[in-house]
Amino acid sequence: MSSHPDQTLWSFPGGLELPGHKALSTAGPIEVAKLPKQLVLPLQQHIGAPANPVVQVGDKVKKGQLLAAPEGFVSAPIHASTSGTVIAIEDRQVPHPSGLSAPCIVLESDGEDAWCELQPHADYVNLDPSELRNIIRDAGIVGLGGAGFPSFIKLNPGARTSIDTLILNGAECEPFISCDDMLMRERADEVVHGARIMQHALNAKRCLIGIEDNKPEAIAAIGEAIRRLNQPSISLMKVPTRYPAGGEKQLIRLLTGKEVPSQGLPIDIGVVCHNVATAASVHRAVELGQPMISRIVTITGHAAAQPQNMEVRLGTPIEAVLEQAGGDNGQAHRLLLGGPMMGFELRNRQLPTTKTANCLLLATDQDAPKREVISDCIRCGQCALVCPMRLLPQQLYWHAKAKDFDKAQDYDLFDCIECGCCTHVCPAQLPLVNFYRFAKTHIWAQEREKQQADLARERHEFRLFRQQREKEEKAARHKAKADAVAKGGGEDSKKAAIKAAMERAKAKKAAVQANGADEAPTEAPVKESTAPETAGQPAPDKEPKP
Ligand code: SF4
Ligand code: SF4
């Protein structure tokens, strides 16, 4: 299958040609991981706020049932990966470079794996794009290419932005990882159906599916699915195998020639980019009604006994996945989550599989060598030659190291995609990306602190303003009442009125007695009110009668 005849391929700067090692894990079909006895579901498996549990310990749940609802706009729900009982909601260690713990829902399987009631929407073309986005949000779909950004947000261009092109990223450029490759080979129809749904949600004129040319089987399968499903607005494009062709900005540049502006988003140039596996999940969510409860994981590396791809329920312990794949062959130097360029080392195999876990790399020393710093930067400039973002990595390094974060930002720190090309070629073996992550984390923390300080200051100023306003209002009330009293004669006039009334009553009684008549008085005597009065005025219902 060649690229679409009307399409021209562009190029991106820098990058590396790396040995792919893809064939290691693509020899057999995708296996299904066994159902574990216990699943641990972190409440944050996505970019954004952690989800909020809607179940309690002891609750019985069905597969696909909502366990935790999104907290705020940038968040994603978590669903039960199987049927069973919630046995704990507590902090557990999660797969993260920090090695820290985070809140998780622990589910004990009942072995039945019984679905809850699902709501498929086979007629999605009749749905409004906003309804589609709600379905995708409620299904907990996040970007499966790495970061885990909630997908419904990227499918909402807003009323004033028109999307010309949807790009599906099937490049999968990082060595060893083959989960997208196998998905495209075996489930090409799901990817194409997902592309159609996303196009509908975005009202995008066309969809381009970019696949690296080292995946001929995937290219053939996707091309065949496009033809069979008769989708003329979807084009397949082969891209050269060069790391990081699967970086969002690099793939957009390769396929459209357009440049995403510095610190901008693809949407700024009328493009939205999603991963092929995300598209397949969107198809399942919309047309089958299934929320995201599993993903395909590559188990690979020259230390893996049986490298392969496996569909794994979210929450399954990594140890169980590795065990089913035969474990390691005794040469494992370290276990990485992700590939050798962007992955990170796992020190605990009991951690759960999450939405963003694309690869378990049982690496030998050659697969992912540990880098020992040889010297400080020798200013050789090799890092700048390979940077696909045209940055100056050595300058970023110096400024990050000196904690001169303003300067690091002046050198476009936040345009760094952390691809690791600079680290890979650095003869001094400096862990450059770690310095960039450190600088970014520090700047975000400073930003958060500043926002919190601004918020605290605003609250304090508002409290002062409110106190002053209340004081002024109280003073105005007092003045108004005092004026009213002065105008109506005040206490003296009230007492005089009471006295006059009593005297009238007394005079009337004396007149009756004098006349010997036995008549009822026409006007009752009025007692002085003992009810509390405000500002010298009698309460309205106690007002003395004249
Ligand atoms: S490659 Fe390493 S040593 Fe060379 S300039 Fe870049 S950071 Fe410095
Ligand atoms: S990690 Fe950042 S600085 Fe280094 S090559 Fe990649 S984009 Fe450039």
Image (cartoon, grey):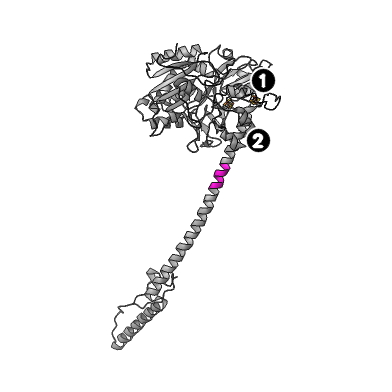
Residue 72 horizontal side relative to residue 330, left or right? left
| Picture disc at residue 369 | 1
Q: Is residue 265 visible?
A: yes
Give the CA separation, mark 2 to mark 1. 27 Å
Image quadrant of residue 201? Answer: top left
* Residue 65 rendering spot, x and y as whole percentages: 48, 31
Quadrant in which ligand 2 is drawn: top right
Q: Quadrant of the C terminus?
A: bottom left
Look at label 1 and name its amino acid: Pro
| Lateral position of residue 487 relative to residue 396, left or right | left
- Give x and y (percent) for residue 83: 52, 28
Magenta includes 488? no
Chief secondary structure of the magenta span?
helix
The part of the chain drawn in magenta is 448-454
Secondary element under disc 1, as helix, strand or loop, is: loop
Number of numbered discs overlaid on the protein picture: 2
* Residue at numbered disc 2: 402
Residue depicted at 36% across the width and 30% down the height: 128
Q: Is mark 2 on a helix, strand or loop?
A: loop
Q: How crowded is mark 2: few (under 14 residues within 10 Å), some or many (20 or more)?
A: few
Q: Where is residue 121 in the image (x, y as percent from the top left)?
A: 39, 26
Disc 1: CA contacts within 10 A as few (<14), some (14-19) or many (>=20): few
Residue 194 horizontal side relative to residue 406, left or right: left
Q: Nearer the viewer, residue 17 or 528?
A: 17
Which comes sooner in the sequence, label 2 or label 1? 1
Write down the quadrant of residue 104 in the picture: top right
Along the line of sight, the residue nearer the viewer: 172 or 361: 172
Q: Nearer the viewer, residue 184 or 384?
A: 384
Q: In this view, does 250 lie above or below 75?
A: above
